[in-house]
Image (cartoon, coloured by chain):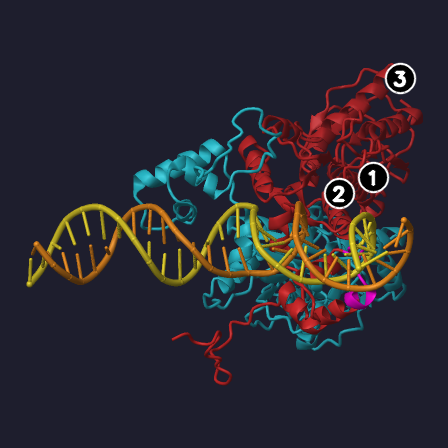
Chain colours: A cyan, B red, C yellow, D orange
Amino acid sequence: MISTPGGTRNDDASPPAPVRAPNIRDVARLAGVSHQTVSRVLNGHASLRETTRQKVVDAMEELQFRPNRAARALVTSKSRTIGVLASNSSEYGPAASLQAIGTAARDAGYTLDTAYLETSDRPAIIDALDRLVGHAVEGLIILAPQSRSLDMIAELSITLPFVTVHSTGGLDDHRLSVDQTAGAVLATRHLLELGHRRIVHVAGPDGWVETAARQRGFQEEMTAWGVEPPPPVHGDWTAESGYAAGRRILCENDVTAVFSSNDQMALGVLHACRDAGLEVPGNLSVVGFDDIPEAAHYWPPLTTVRQDFAELGRRCVALLVAALAGNAPEHPHDVLPELVVRQSTEPPRPG
Amino acid sequence: MISTPGGTRNDDASPPAPVRAPNIRDVARLAGVSHQTVSRVLNGHASLRETTRQKVVDAMEELQFRPNRAARALVTSKSRTIGVLASNSSEYGPAASLQAIGTAARDAGYTLDTAYLETSDRPAIIDALDRLVGHAVEGLIILAPQSRSLDMIAELSITLPFVTVHSTGGLDDHRLSVDQTAGAVLATRHLLELGHRRIVHVAGPDGWVETAARQRGFQEEMTAWGVEPPPPVHGDWTAESGYAAGRRILCENDVTAVFSSNDQMALGVLHACRDAGLEVPGNLSVVGFDDIPEAAHYWPPLTTVRQDFAELGRRCVALLVAALAGNAPEHPHDVLPELVVRQSTEPPRPG
DNA sequence: GTGGTGAATGTGAACGGTAACATTGCGGCT
DNA sequence: AGCCGCAATGTTACCGTTCACATTCACCAC
């Protein structure tokens, strides 16, 4: 005896139903088509009768169907994910870039997988990169500006396309940035043009790409004007370290201007000046870097170099996405920094 | 004629080999076990002879095997991902929390999927939540402090476990925060104890949970001291808006103190004072909120209320992970804010 | 020895999509 | 009429992992 297919049906009193999310076959059944047709609708295939497409769309709507990313990722072996190696600072700049990257990535149909670097030592970087690779990201954006990160990428022989937000001014396909060196030149030239010669540079910590680039810009421009650049005083980007640097600098009483590698440290320098009873810009001119939103409200409002962090983030994504799509990466031109003159600089007092 | 199975072998000159990443069957073959045994090693199954385990581990090592997340997610229908709804501000607070969340999530074996809210209107929130749900996140952390976000969650009938970083002071299982109201009370009381009575509150924008909570704390404490609280002046968290608020406030010349809902706006108020030729704290006392790292270097160093953003982020993750593991969420106790007295406050001048 | 027990391991079938190839139907050309 | 070609759709296999269940084996009690 041959039983009819699908014998028992348990129409009523069915067991508690495991409530599975609908898949393309459920949609197909409801729409009266094959699951492949549903897949074609999903992927915008060309050869589809409009009536069919509509039936499928309606069925999707009715079932509240959502395609399963994991299944798609499994079969295509594409994660549609971009990995970001981020430094663990809560500074304005990185935060602004990160956010812009997140938004741009989303608009391009990518998801971000962000690894925050707790420390910037070797194992931490390796660990973070390893995790990102393990998550099968399709490309990398290096927001962590430690020069080491780049070395690690090379060392781990990571073959993924990647973009770094920071550059030394020399561009290659992988690097994109506000030209930090040019920005530093701008700031330094501004002070030189005002007549300052005894200028000290408060630099960021060693090992950061920005630190090196801005330092170089300072030194180059000083040298170009025939002024011997004094050794930089290093901080760690915080206002606190800028304050410490300021105290140290003010001991040498012939300094007339300071170029700080970021705005927060400049704020610390301003603070140190007040402690020492010095006026800015009367006794000392100060230039910052970044133009964070607060800089205009410091006392005095800070002359600084503006960076467009958001634009930078967006460009990174554009560059990487182009690379992922196999497009020849159009050689990115730098985002240009801009000097914003406020009230913390003026010509040095005679004498 | 029946050919022998696997006839042609193309030993040499084989086609370019699609270089597939090794999977558990490759590992199994090399280790001389079944793929299931490899899976068991991967998942730390108990019944495994140590020698077998070692063989498998060696094989994994040799092949540089990495388990495929998508395949695992597909079959387990667990993404091991936490969704974060973040506001699009580059402020210190959210950035610090976000980073702590990212680190804590990683330590707990979860990945973050962050949706940055470009605007805080309805469609944007719905869109962001929709995307996170579509990405099959297992739980949500709401870093976007708009009250609306919570309404949207309810409205979309999202059944995912979620935690919000912001609270109105009243705790439920979902909310965790520095007690903003208590912080505002602290700040207000400090001014009242110094003898101030004409105190204006510079509040954040409407629709933010923090705005409401801090405003309430201010009003409650003022009322408790028998002082009628004047209507708040609203800003948008930026120093610029604090500056505008300051100018407006200083028109009413009998105000002796300002409590600003965050440090950046307080900075703007300080700026407005200088423009008006007023001294802080001589003519006006100013209290901020957050204690961002720069606050100690403002002029004058700002009295403010400290929030531990990182701790907050960590707790969020702990709470959510516990919920995901099915553990009874231990009722979170609030992170307590702390008054940091610096030099921007003093008793009002007599008269 | 026979059967039971549990540890250690293997087998086959999912999971939800996409790719490759097969099939159908229809209009135009010869 | 017969055939071709293409648009529209269907069929089947496969991606890499886990799950449920089956099998093997050693050991022990009877």
Cα–Cα span, label 1 and label 2: 8 Å
Question: Do we see residue A44 in this rendering?
Answer: yes
Residue A133 percent location from the top left of the image: 65, 63
Q: Which mark is residue B93?
A: 2
Taking B222 as reference, is B41 left or right? left
Q: Are marks 1 and 3 on the same chain?
A: yes
Query: Mark 1 or 3, which is nearer the eye?
Result: 1
Q: Quickly name the residue at label 3.
A: B225
> D9 or A123, which is in the foreground?
D9
Residue A15 percent location from the top left of the image: 61, 30
Residue that appears at 88% across and 52% down: A277
Q: Amino acid at mark 3?
A: Trp
Which numbered disc, 1 or 2, marks the residue that appears first in the sequence?
A: 2
> C22 or A252, which is in the foreground?
C22
Query: Mark 2 or 3, which is nearer the eye?
Result: 2
Q: Quickly name the residue at label 1.
A: B307
- Does dot 1 land on a helix, a strand or a loop? loop
Taking A206 as reference, is B245 left or right? left
> B114 or A351, which is in the foreground?
B114
Residue A163 percent location from the top left of the image: 59, 65
Q: Which mark is residue A293?
A: none
Q: Amino acid at mark 2?
A: Gly
Residue A73 percent location from the top left of the image: 55, 54
The residue furthest bottom is: B12
Label 2 environment density (alpha carbons within 10 Å; few <14, some 14–19, many ≥20): some
